[in-house]
Image (cartoon, grey):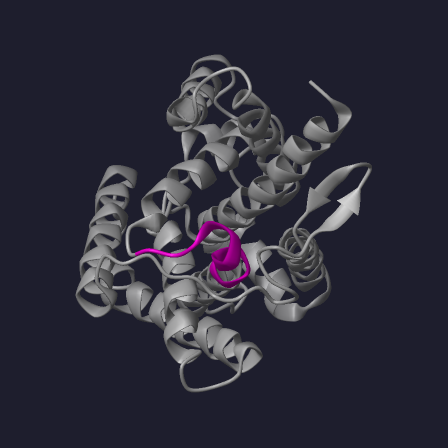
Amino acid sequence: MTLELSIQYLMAGITYGSIYAIVAIGFNIIYNTTGIINFAQGEFVMFGGMIAITLLNFMPLPLAIFLAVVITMFIGALIEICFIRWLKSPSVLRMIIITIGISILSREVAVHIWGESIRSLPYFVGNEITSIPILGARISPQVMWVVLVSALMVVCLGLFFKTTSVGREMRACASNRKAATLCGINTRNMVTLSFVLSAGIGALAGCIMSPITYSQYDMGTGLAIKGFTVAILGGLGSSGGAVVAGLLLGVIEAFSVSVVPLAFQDAISIAILLGILFIRPQGLFGSKEAAGLKEY
């Protein structure tokens, strides 16, 4: 394998790995606050991309992306209020079934609105033939957008949870929800906020990846599987672990193309997930409490 080809694979792995990491962080935000594993997380990514593509017909790209993120955040809040908030101490299995049902419902709504056609946002800078030379390899400028925006989201989320009062309240809910309630924190609002925040970063990820991977009504399922794999690999609840695991999975998938056919790429993620669950259920950076799943 030549150096140029290796760099090409590496950049592709970092690009997709960054997207997987953002989806996994969405899983972690909701899990940390509620103990829920939201299998509809991939649909937030889908909604972000598809709504932005629709709005682009009426307004400039930056405004379309901004409004798509805001609308998807509203959808996240609506999902929590309609399907989650009214439940009283549901089991983990019940919550998994509910979020899978939300995922299916979201896809049905999307296919009725947008149909089965594949769409995409335009490149933020340049076009599909524009490329940046890196050590002999040619990298699309949109790849740099994906990596930079993903890194910025991770940094901003870290600052939000560590430096803001709302972020600290969400962390308190994650540590001990009953104690947080006794301290006067409105845990119901924190749960809603976790869905809003998770939906927002998912929607932004859907917008920045759309020019590269394209957008379709059923794209969320595959991303949810990859994001869940990364969340488990990095350790449920660990955002730093999600970043490391996402990049690791992305690079493994990219280089695997030179060894196995592209059709088997998704099987690699499933194999890694099963291996982790057997060998180290808490993931690389997770705790044994996370491996056992917290109660809602």
- Residue at 60 percent across and 62 percent down: it is 127
| 7 inside magenta stretch | no
Q: Nearer the viewer, residue 232 or 44?
A: 44
- Residue at 65 percent across and 66 percent down: it is 125
Q: How many marks?
A: 0
Residue 57 coordinates in the image, percent (x, y)? 40, 81
Residue sitting at the far bottom:
58
Residue 285 coordinates in the image, percent (x, y)? 62, 30
Q: Is residue 129 left or right of residue 185?
A: right
Asked if residue 241 shows in the view, the reply is: no
Q: Is residue 243 left or right of residue 170?
A: right
Q: Is residue 290 left or right of residue 92?
A: right
Q: Is residue 153 left or right of residue 54?
A: right
Quarter of the image that includes the N terminus: top right
Residue 204 coordinates in the image, percent (x, y)? 52, 63
| 215 inside magenta stretch | yes
Q: Nearer the viewer, residue 33 or 222?
A: 222
The residue segment tinted magenta is 206-216
Residue sitting at the far right:
135
Q: Is residue 115 above or below residue 26?
A: below
Asked if residue 164 shows in the view, the reply is: yes
- Dividing the picture into quadrants, the one containing residue 85 is bottom left
Q: Nearer the viewer, residue 3 or 198?
A: 3
- Dividing the picture into quadrants, the one containing residue 106 is bottom left
Q: Nearer the viewer, residue 180 or 18?
A: 18
Q: Is the magenta region chiefly helix, strand or loop?
A: helix
Q: Is residue 81 above or below residue 280?
A: below
Residue 55 coordinates in the image, percent (x, y)? 40, 79
- Dividing the picture into quadrants, the one containing residue 256 is top right
